[in-house]
Image: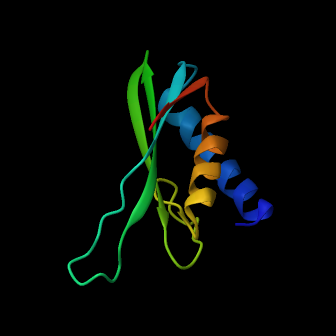
């Protein structure tokens, strides 16, 4: 995951956060999901959830950072990175864009 790709993603995400939450205090809830195994052992799914919650105004925005073979930041709420460490790092960068974060192991 390059710094340039990450910066461009965050630049696109910030207006969406502002649109959804306005000036509300937003908390990012980060959780590493257990790996979901496919029936044949191929296409296993690994992700880090970074859910943004705001009480006033009451709103939520769920971002699921997927770990797959190729990076893709085209879809704001489902970015794709190539390693679990990259997914964790991206979740922390997203959390830095809002008021606070909580890590749920």
Taking depth in this image into account, of 30 and 94 the one nearest to the observer is 30
> Up-down: is 87 above or below 59?
below
The relative height of residue 35 versus residue 12 in the rendered view (above or below) is below
Tell me residue 87's x, y (percent). 57, 56
Relative horizontal placement of residue 12, taking residue 105 as reference (left or right): right
**Which residue shows up at 66% across the image and 56% down it?**
9
Q: Which residue is outermost to the top? A: 56
Q: How many marks?
A: 0
Residue 100, x across and y down, in percent: 59, 24
Between 27 and 84, the one nearer to me in the picture? 84
In the drawing, does residue 101 fall left or right of residue 60?
Answer: right
In the image, taking residue 33 as reference, residue 22 lies left or right, namely right
Residue 6: where, in percent of width, then height? Answer: 71, 58
Image quarter in which the C terminus is found: top left
Q: Tell me what residue is drawn at x 53 percent, y 24 percent.
A: 26
Q: Residue 61 appears in which quarter of the rendering?
A: top left
Residue 64 position (above or below residue 69) = above
Q: Which of the two residues, 104 or 92, is positioned nearer the viewer here?
A: 104
Question: Which residue sits at x=30%, y=64%?
Answer: 36
Residue located farthest toward the left when viewing the structure as drawn = 39
Quadrant holding the N terminus = bottom right
Query: Is 74 or 71 nearer to us in this picture?
Result: 71
Residue 96: percent from left, percent from top? 67, 34
* Residue shown at the point (52%, 55%) measured from the top left: 76
């Amino acid at each position: 995951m390059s710094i340039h790709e990450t910066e461009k993603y965050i630049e696109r995400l910030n207006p969406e956060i502002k649109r959804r939450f306005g000036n509300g205090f937003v908390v990012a809830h980060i959780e590493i999901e257990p790996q979901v195994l496919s029936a044949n052992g191929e296409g296993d799914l690994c992700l880090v959830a970074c859910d943004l919650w705001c009480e006033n105004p009451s709103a939520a925005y769920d971002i699921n950072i997927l770990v797959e073979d190729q990076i893709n930041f085209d879809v704001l709420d489902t970015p794709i990175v190539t390693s679990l460490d990259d997914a964790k790092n991206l979740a922390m960068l997203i959390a830095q864009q809002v008021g606070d974060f909580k890590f749920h192991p």
